[in-house]
Image (spheres, grey):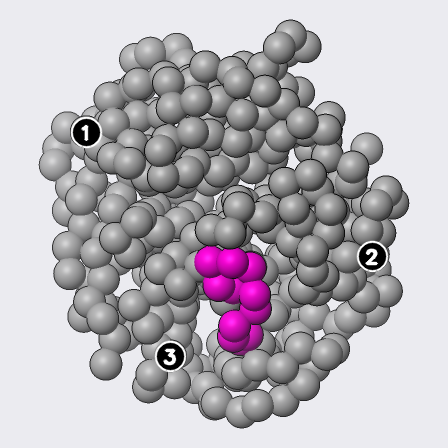
């Protein structure tokens, strides 16, 4: 059984230095972003935020109780929330009212063993990835089961591309078809059409991080946790641009990635979650041995702003999980997040605070100002 390391992420921002240099590292060419946490100074980043909408999720329905939220998608005026711990995918309207549950845990038709990822198309049809059974499950827009298909390899994540091909992030422990491939595209019948990335020999296949493809206005963002290479893919699955985050002497050594359970708590820095790329900005999270940090990198000015979670404010963006169809950032807050970072919610309505105190969740939809 593989060890699943669920990384809890939260976010905000501050200043540091970076450069724009073309280099090659492990056959990845891209823009190098030099990051230092030594001179961390808080800088107000509200200039990037135009406005935020807070949506209180209905929680008095048994089905809408969450364990750990691992993915949120907003599409067709619905909010889709995946809870990998409780093995369910829930749908809410844009006012936070519970609409339906998609499929369920079990052994019958349309029932899955787990949910590793999901995709919603433009008509509202839903595909769920069950990595345990190596299957994709199709449901219509009302949640009715349509069909399932067996996948001939082990995979962590997926999406359906605009050209009707699949994009798969394969598991490091995949010893079936396409062993050694990390990121591939396939036909609808799962025949490989391209190999985009391959695993190096420095990978611990027993240590699996929670990560997903982030859909944005240009296509998809791919990053496998502990790897500091971030890739912007097109809507048809080609790598168009790469960013390499360089923490200098605090980079996670390649050789130590072979045994993650022994190395994960060492004095290294690494990206804690898949960064979001939108509006000329890269937003994400950094883990160091001493603290959790969030960052905003301005692609145009080449400045990076870093913030320790101790400076958390509800005014800023925290825990980014995705992007809406009109390029707004999707995050959420609950009591667990506020407990971890000691944050306050003075800037939300009082009934929202009561909702959080009772164990409720609030989805935040933040509109950004284009970077200059």
- Callout 2: 10 Å neighbours few (<14), some, many (20+)? some
Residue ranking furthest to the left: 349
Most common secondary structure along the magenta stretch: strand
Q: Is 102 located above or below residue 151 in the figure?
A: above
Secondary structure beneath label 3: loop
Was residue 241 drawn as part of the magenta stretch in this picture? yes
Instruction: State the residue position of label 1.
Output: 95
Residue 170, x across and y down, in percent: 71, 49
**Residue 299: which numbered mark, if any?**
3
Instruction: State the residue position of label 2.
Output: 180
Looking at the rendering, the stretch of residues picked out in magenta corresponds to 233-243
Dot 2 or dot 1, earlier in sequence: 1
Q: Nearer the viewer, mark 3 or mark 2?
A: 2
Q: Are marks 3 and 2 in contact (CB under 8 Å)?
A: no
In space, the residues marked 2 and 1 are separated at their CA atoms by 44 Å
- Callout 3: 10 Å neighbours few (<14), some, many (20+)? some
Q: How many marks?
A: 3
Q: Residue at x 38, y 79 (%)?
A: 299
Q: Residue at x 25, y 75 (%)?
A: 371
Q: Is 31 located above or below residue 273 in the figure?
A: below
Secondary structure beneath label 2: loop
Q: Residue at x 40, y 63 (%)?
A: 218
Location of residue 259 (image quadrant): bottom right
Residue 301, x across and y down, in percent: 33, 86
Q: Residue at x 77, y 57 (%)?
A: 181
Secondary structure beneath label 1: loop
Q: Is residue 234 left or right of residue 156?
A: left
Dot 1 or dot 3, earlier in sequence: 1
In space, the residues marked 3 and 2 are separated at their CA atoms by 32 Å
Q: Viewer-proximal residue, 301 or 361?
A: 301
Q: Viewer-proximal residue, 310 or 45?
A: 45
């Amino acid at each position: 059984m593989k060890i699943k390391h669920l990384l809890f992420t939260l976010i905000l921002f501050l200043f540091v230095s970076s450069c724009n240099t073309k280099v090659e590292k492990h056959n990845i060419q891209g823009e190098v972003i030099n990051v230092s946490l030594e001179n961390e100074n808080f800088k107000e980043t509200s200039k990037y935020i135009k406005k935020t909408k807070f949506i209180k999720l209905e929680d008095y329905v048994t089905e809408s109780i969450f364990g750990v939220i691992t993915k949120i998608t907003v599409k067709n005026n619905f909010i889709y929330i995946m809870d990998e711990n409780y093995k369910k995918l829930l749908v809410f309207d844009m006012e936070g009212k519970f609409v339906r549950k998609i499929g369920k845990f079990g052994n019958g038709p349309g029932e899955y063993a787990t949910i590793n990822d999901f995709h919603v198309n433009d008509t509202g049809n839903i595909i769920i990835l069950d990595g345990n059974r190596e299957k994709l499950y199709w449901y219509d827009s009302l949640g009715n089961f349509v069909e399932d298909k067996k996948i001939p390899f082990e995979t962590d994540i997926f999406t359906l591309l605009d050209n009707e091909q699949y994009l798969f992030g394969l598991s490091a422990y995949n010893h079936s078809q396409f062993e050694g491939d990390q990121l591939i595209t396939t036909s609808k019948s799962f025949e490989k059409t391209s190999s985009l990335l391959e695993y190096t020999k420095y990978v611990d296949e027993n240590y699996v991080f929670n990560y997903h493809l982030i859909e944005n206005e240009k296509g998809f963002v791919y990053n496998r946790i502990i790897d500091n290479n971030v890739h912007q893919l097109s809507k048809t699955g080609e790598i168009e641009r790469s960013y390499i985050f360089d923490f200098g002497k605090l980079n996670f050594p390649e050789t130590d990635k072979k045994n993650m359970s022994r190395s994960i708590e060492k004095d290294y820095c690494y990206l804690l979650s898949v960064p979001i790329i939108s509006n000329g900005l890269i937003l994400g999270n950094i883990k160091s041995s001493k603290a959790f940090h969030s960052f905003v990198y301005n692609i145009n000015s080449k400045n990076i702003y870093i913030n320790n979670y101790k400076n958390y404010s509800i005014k800023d963006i925290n825990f980014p999980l995705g992007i809406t169809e009109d390029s707004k950032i999707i995050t959420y807050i609950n009591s667990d997040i506020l407990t971890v970072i000691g944050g306050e919610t003075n800037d939300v309505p009082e009934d929202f605070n009561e909702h959080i105190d009772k164990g409720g969740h609030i989805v935040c939809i933040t509109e950004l100002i284009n970077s200059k």
